[in-house]
Amino acid sequence: MLRGERVMLRPVGDGDRDALAAILAEESVARWWSPGTPEEHADAWLEDDPDTTVWVIEADGAVAGSISAWEQADPDYRHAGIDVFLSAAHQGRGLGTDAIRAVARHLLRDRGHHRLTIDPSATNARAIAAYRRVGFREVGVLRSYERGRDGTFHDGLLMDLLEGELT
């Protein structure tokens, strides 16, 4: 378990699938995901991957969303990446920022990474602002990076945070 100032992050379990699928179905979340159903996205999010850790974000006793971290173990390229989503009811309250900060702290201090990455849609201003508050900086635009719900490719924004930049 990891703790932020206002959120608790606990390991995700199979019993979380329906709650996560419901959040992934919300328009404010679904608009940023690729084609597919919320159930398919939840199943993919819950897939067992030895390089990825997934937590449920809990706030005020409720499932607020989920956050994951994948790790590159090659010592010459060692770094980690983060992905996150929050329900509409929990957006705009600083909870995502708190969760990202807690995971970033864990990856940098406990897991020994020197660099973290995150890659939101280039048009997801709310997410980009949250990542900046934690200390992430823009590296560059990933052109035609990800397929959107409309089936076309959209730009992504590569952001990174180096050890010592966490705010």
Image (spheres, helix red, strand yellow):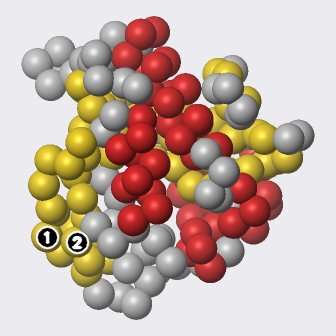
The x, y position of residue 12, in whole percent, is 69, 38
**Mark 1 neighbour class, 10 Å CA radius: few under 14, some 14 to 19, many 20 or more:** few
The x, y position of residue 152, in whole percent, is 29, 87
Q: Is residue 51 visible?
A: no
SS under mark 2? strand
Front residue of 5 and 81: 5
9 relative to 150, above or below: above
Q: Residue at x 64, y 67 (%)?
A: 24
Q: Residue at x 59, y 73 (%)?
A: 28
In the rendered image, which residue does mark 1 sit on? 143
Three-letter amino acid code at disc 2?
Asp
* Image quarter (top left, top right, bottom left or bottom right) of the N terminus: top right
The x, y position of residue 148, in whole percent, is 38, 79
In which quarter of the view is residue 85 placed? bottom right
164 relative to 29, above or below: above
Is residue 71 found left or right of 149 in the rendered image? left
First-in-chain label (1 vs 2)? 1
Asked if the residue under mark 2 is in contact with the one under mark 1, i.e. CB atoms within 8 Å, the reply is yes
